[in-house]
Amino acid sequence: MQALAHSVRDRLIERWHDTHQYFKKKDPKRIYFLSLEFLMGRSLTNSVTNLGIQDQYADALTQLGFDYEVLAEQEGDAALGNGGLARFAACQMDSLATLDYPAWGYGLRYQYGLFRQIIVDGFQHEQPDFWLNFGNPWEIERVHVSYPVKFYGTVEEEVLNGKKCKIWIPGESVEAVAYDNPIPGYGTRNAINLRLWAAKPSDQYDMESYTTGDYINAIVNRQKAETISNVLYPDDRSYQGKELRLKQQYFFVSASLQDIMRRFKDLHRSFDEFPEKVALQINDTHPSISIAEVMRVLVDEEHLDWSKAWDIACRIFSVTIHAVQPEGLEKIPVDLLGSVLPRHLEIIYEINYRLVEELKKSFGQDYDKLSRMSIIEEGAVKSIRMANLSLACCHTVNGVSRVHLETLKTRVFKDYYELWPQKFQCKTNGVTQRRWIVVSNPSLCSIISKWLGTEAWIRNVDLISGLREYAKDPDLHTEWKNMKRVNKMRLAEYIETLTSVKVSLDAMFNVQIKRIHEYKRQLLNMLGIIHRYDCIKNMDESDKRRVVPRVCIIGGKAAPGYEVAKKIIKLCHAVADKVNNDPDVGDLLKVVFIPDYNVSVAELVIPGSDLSQHLSTAGHEASGTGCMKFLMNGCLLLATADGSAVEIAEEIGAENMFLFGAKVDEVPALREKGTTLKGSLQFARVVRMVRDGYFGFKDYFKSLCDTVEDGGDFYLLGYDFASYLEAQAAADRTFVDQEKWTQMSILSTAGSGKFSSDRTIEEYAQQSWGIEPCKCPF
Ligand code: GLG
C-alpha cells in the first residue's frame, strides 16, 4: 500500500508542481479557503480516479501479483474534522481543482484526528486516532516553508514618523511548518494545494533559561509548542472558550496569512491591489480571528491607515455560516483573548467602536438592538462574538440551503439582515460526484455512462438528468436492480464481519448514518423500530407474511461529553440485542449499529442502502449533505422538510420521496403549546416499553425517556411520531412494488445534479469570490 501510494504521489506531484508554476506565471486572483477542519477520508482511489490511471494501476498490480482493491482497503482515513462542515470542505476542494480554479486550502495538520469509536457492551468508548503512525504518503513536508506564530505578551506604544503606533511585544513564538497535500482535479491537469500547518518549537531559543541552567525545563517548554496542532476538538456544536482552541485558530490563520501575503508581495508592491488578487473564505466562524489579524498586519506592520486597511479587509473576506442555533456560534471570553492575543483584542474593540458608531446612525439610541449587534457581549462572562465580527467585515454571508438562509435572515442575524440585506446569500451545499459515485459506486458509474452514452457527466453533472428519459425502461431497471443487489451484498458481508448479524438481501436496507444528536432524532428512529417490533410480536402468521422485512442500520459518533447522545447509542444496542435474538421476528426485522462511522464506511454503506433517513426537527439542520450522497446513489429519502431536503423535493418531485413531520414555520408555535402537546398513544406505548426496562437498563434510560415526555420534548418526537410511522408505512407499500421503487430510485439519481459541489463552487466563484478558472495546459 505504501509503495503504491508513493508511486501515485509521484504523478500527483508533477501536476501539482506544474499547476503552481502556471498559477505563478498567470497570477490570477486566488481563492484561499480557510477551514479548521477537512474530512478527506482515503486518498488512493480518489487520486487514481481523478488522474485517470486506475485501470493501468490495477493491471500493473495484477502483473506483480497484487489486487488493487485489496490494497486500497488497507488505507486509513484522514479524519481531520467532525462532520458535515468538514466533509463539505473536502468536497469543495475536489470541485475547485476539477473546475480549474486557482485555489488554496489552508488548515491544521492534527496529529490526532477525530476519535475512533469502539463499542463495549453497547456503550461508546473513544480511542485516539493517531493516524500518522506509519507516515502519510499523501503529504509533502515543506521544512523550508515555515513561519513564526506569536502569542501572549503586551502591547506598547511607539512613535513612528511622528505618528503614534501600537506594537505587539509577543511573549511566545511557535513555528508553523507547512505540509502540502496535492488535490487532483478530474479530467484536467490541475492539482491544487491543501496546505496544513504543524506546530514545531521555535528556533529562537529561550536563551535566559538556558543560561540560568534550567536546561530541562527549557526543553520541556519547547516541546509544549507542539501541542497546538495535536488534537482535533471532537464536539461539532458547542465551544467552551478554551485557550488551546483559540491558539489553534490563530496559529493556522496567522501562518496562512503570512504565506498568502508573502506570495502577494513577491509580485505586487501596493496593498491597493490586494483585493484584486486575493479572496479569503472563512469556513464557519472558526477562522474569523483572521479579520483582526489582517487589520493588525496592515495597520501595525504595513502602516496603512485604519480606514484604508478596513476597506481592504471588507473587500477580501466572505464567510459561510453552518450553524442554525445562536448557541452554535463561537464566543471567546474577553479575558482569554486579551491574554493570548492582546493586540487583537484592542483591534476588535476598535472595530466594534466604529461599528457601533455607524449603527447609531441607522438605529439611533436603540440600545437593545445595538447591544445585540455589538461584537462584544456583556454579561457574566464578557465575550467576543466571532460571528458578529465576521458579519461586520465580510462582503458576503452565505447560508448553506434556502431554508437555512431564511433562518439566518429572520432569526439568527435578523438585525444585521435588516441593515445589510445585500450581504446575505444562499449557496446550497453540494457533494462531489467523483467521490460519491465514481469512486464509491463504480457499477452505478458504468450504468450512468452507458445510458447517457458519455462520461461527460463526471465533470458536467447536469447531464445526469438525461437518465429521466429511461426511468421506465425495463432494461435499465434490470441493470439498476443488479447494481443495488451487488452493493447490498458487499454491505451485508461487512455487517456480518463487524457484528456477526446475518441479514437478508431481500430486506429493505434502511439507513441513518450521521453524528448522533438530539436534533437529528436517532431516538425517533429507534422508537419507530420498537413500534415495528411490537407490531410484529402481536401479529399472527398470516399478517406476518405481509410485513416488508427490514434491516435498520444506524451509525454515528457522539461527542465524548454528550451524555444523551451516548444513551441513544446504548439504546440502539439494547434494542438490537433483543430484536435480533427474537425467534418470533427472524428476518422480518434486524437492527445493526455500525461502529466507527467515517468517510470510508459511508462509501460502503451509501451505495448499499435502499432507504435513508434524515429526521431532523424542522429548522435544525442547516443543510445536510449526507442526503445528497444517498440521492446520487439512488437511495430513496425519508425526511423532514428541513435544510436541503426541501430543495431535493423540488428537484425530484415530493412524490419521489417520503416527507413527514412538522414544517419549519410550524415548529415555534408547536413548542409554545408545550405541555399540552401529547404524542399519540402509540408513542406513549413505545416510550413506556423503554421506561419499564423491556430492553434492560431501566434506570440508565430513564433520563432519555424524560427528554421526550413530561412536557419536555423540545425536538417534537411525540408530535411527529404519527406522521413518521405513516411515512415508513408508505415506504413499505412502495417497496413491495419493485417497479415503482426502481423508477423512483432512478429519478432520484437523475435529479441529483443540483446537489453537486461543482454547482456550489461555481456560485461561490461568481457571486462571492470573483475568480476565474486558470487551466494549466496538458
Ligand atoms: C453543519 C450543519 C449541516 C451542514 C454542514 C455543511 O450541521 O447541516 O450540512 O454543516 O454545511 N456542523 C455541520 O456539520
Image (cartoon, grey):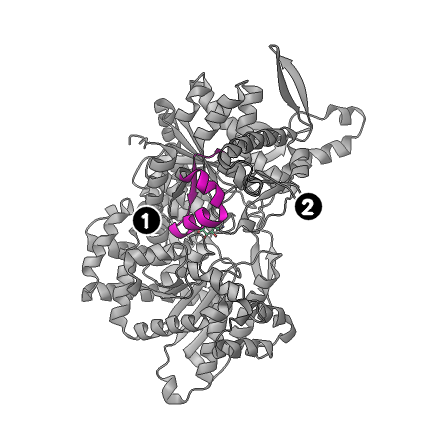
- Give the class, few, some or many, for how many residues have Cα within 10 Å of label 2's Cα (few <14, many ≥20): few
Whole-percent x and y of residue 81?
A: 51, 47
Q: Could you say which is closer to the camera, residue 545 or residue 41? A: 545
**Which corner quadrant of the image does residue 25 belong to?**
top left
Q: Residue furthest right?
A: 212
Instruction: Decide if residue 659 is in sight here.
Output: yes
Q: Could you say which is closer to the camera, residue 245 or residue 449? A: 245
Magenta residues, as a range? 393-421
Residue 645 belongs to magenta span: no
Which kind of residue does numbered mark 1 sit on? Asp
Q: Could you say which is closer to the camera, residue 672 or residue 663? A: 672
Residue shown at 38%/28% (left/top)? 29
Residue on which the image places disc 2: 380
Which label was assigned to residue 632?
Answer: none
- Mark 1 sits near ligand 1, with its Cβ under 8 Å away: no
Whole-percent x and y of residue 191?
A: 37, 36
Q: Secondary structure at mark 1?
A: helix
Residue on which the image places disc 1: 59
Image height of 290 relative to 62, above or below: above
Which kind of residue does numbered mark 2 sit on? Ala
Q: Distance of mark 1 from mark 2, alpha carbons?
A: 66 Å
- Give the class, few, some or many, for how many residues have Cα within 10 Å of label 1's Cα (few <14, many ≥20): some
Q: Residue furthest front?
A: 365
Magenta stretch: dominant SS? helix
Q: Secondary structure at mark 2?
A: loop
Instruction: Decide if residue 75 is in sight here.
Output: no
Q: Single out the mark in the foreground, 1 or 2.
A: 2
Whole-percent x and y of residue 115?
A: 57, 53
- Mark 2 sits near ligand 1, with its Cβ under 8 Å away: no
Q: Is residue 54 left or right of residue 368?
A: left
Residue shown at 32%/72% (left/top)? 735
